[in-house]
Image (tube, rainbow, N blue to C red):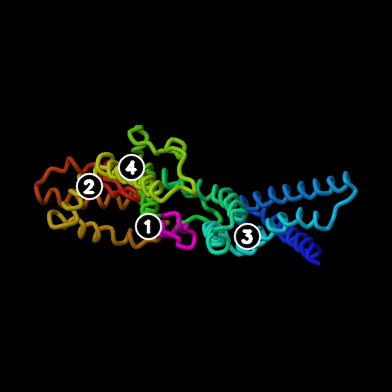
Amino acid sequence: CALVEDLLFISNSFALIEEFVAKRLRRFEYGSVMQSLCSCLDDMMHEHSAVVSSIEEQYRRKKHMSVRELQVISQPLADKLAVLSQVVYTAVDRKGGALINGLRLLLVHQYQGNSFAEAILARLLNEATKPFMTMFDKWLTSGVLYDPCKEFMIQYHEEAEWDGRYTLDNSNTLEHFFPTAMEAKRVLLAGKYWDGVRSCKDATIFQTGSVKLPSPTSAGLGLEYRAKGAQVASHIQKLYKGASETLLRVLVEECDLVGTLRLMKRYFLLDQGDFFLNFLDAAEDELSRDPAKLRQFRVQHLLQVSVQITENHNDASNDDISPLRISPADLTCRFAT
């Protein structure tokens, strides 16, 4: 009969969800989004067990319960577990932003207009998106990326140069969250700009306290997944502008970008570019060494001598280029600091 089928479906669905949660809840490799989702599913299973216990208690008090009564009581349980079973099937091969997108598509394509299912999926989405939005806020406000399980919309390429070190991962970019593709691009750039500012820390400009990186807590509460498109665009634009202005100020004021460009024009273009040929001739043997065995002090000395020869040849003052040193900073290459 229909009641037997409902009870069998409830039992099978409960076992399916419990197995799914038990396998993934405390497994690091599935990612923080999956762990948050499983934690919420686990809470729902406890709520389900509490309802079943109350039904059992009700039956013991009355000592009688008709088939019709049991069918009416069990129907909401079956409907809820049906939704949660679809959630499990959707989430089984996904993680991170792709998992959130899968749940969103399940809500839109299969349960839109079903208020009961929408409430369940909204609760699951609200919990599952919290770790993702925490990563989003940290990246957008300070350029910090901690994503060991590759869940976030930004990918890190350790061996790449700074310009290509961070890229967008379209599979983990939240659909229906960004009003346009431009907002996602600005999220990428804002974090890269803060990373650029952070890279300048190696040049000791932060020791003066003139430039301070913001923390997510000082930047506000951040965005929630259910935020409206206009709010998302405005928030991203504000933080993107702040990051770009800070990086520009660091490069121009703290790292003396204009002075560095003047030196590059002077020594690498037509003005006194012959020093470079002198340097390559003098340092050829040293530069052919393995990088790990390169004697930096020797190369630095040859660089100093080559510049001095050019300066003497042109009868120019060399006060602004002494002492010379080689700087390993990522964003700045300066003759003097």
Is mark 3 in CB contact (under 8 Å) with mark 1? no
N-terminal label among 3 and 1: 3
Which residue appears farthest toward the right when viewing the image? 63
* 29 inside magenta stretch: no
Which residue appears farthest toward the left when viewing the image? 315
From the image, tell me which residue sits under label 2. Answer: 260
Q: Nearer the viewer, mark 3 or mark 2?
A: 3
Q: Is residue 259 left or right of residue 34?
A: left
Whole-angstrom CA distance, mark 1 to mark 4, is 20 Å
- Specify the segment rendered in magenta: 157-178
- The residue at 24%/61% (across/down) is 281
Is mark 2 in CB contact (under 8 Å) with mark 1? no
| Residue 109, placed above or below residue 251 | below
From the image, tell me which residue sits under label 3. Answer: 87
Q: Nearer the viewer, mark 3 or mark 4?
A: 3
Q: Amino acid at mark 1?
A: Thr
N-terminal label among 2 and 1: 1
N-terminal label among 3 and 4: 3
Mark 3 Cα within 10 Å, few/some/many (few <14, many 20+)? many
